[in-house]
Image (cartoon, rainbow, N blue to C red):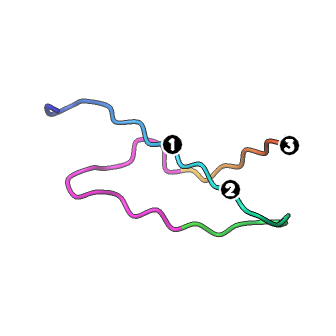
Amino acid sequence: MTIGDLVTVRLIISTKEDMESVNLKDIRASSLEPVDVLSGTNTKIP
């Protein structure tokens, strides 16, 4: 990695039971700053 590289992180959460919502705390690695800090939702129904 070099300065200015864009790093994409994808978090996939699976549960054994149905849930209405999930609260997730994702701590960024040192020396990395977020480009898009807005929360978002993505729902996939199998």
Residue at numbered disc 2: 14
Q: Secondary structure at mark 2?
A: loop
Q: Amino acid at mark 1?
A: Arg
Q: Which of 2 and 17 lies nearest the eye of the viewer? A: 17
Q: Amino acid at mark 3?
A: Ile
Q: Position of residue 13 (x, y in %)?
A: 63, 55
Q: Are marks 1 and 3 in contact (CB under 8 Å)?
A: no
Task: Residue at 41% x, 36% y: name it.
Answer: 8
Q: Mark 1 touching mark 2, by CB under 8 A? A: no
Q: Give the quadrant of the C terminus.
A: top right
Tell me what residue is drawn at x 59 percent, y 49 percent. 12
Indicate which disc, 3 or 2, sits on the residue closer to the N terminus: 2
Mark 1: few, some, or many residues within 10 Å (few <14, many ≥20)? few
**Residue 12 vertical position relative to residue 3 in the rendered view, above or below:** below
Give the mark nearest the N terminus, 1 or 3.
1
How far is mark 3 from mark 2, CA to CA?
12 Å
Report whether 17 appears left or right of 12.
Answer: right
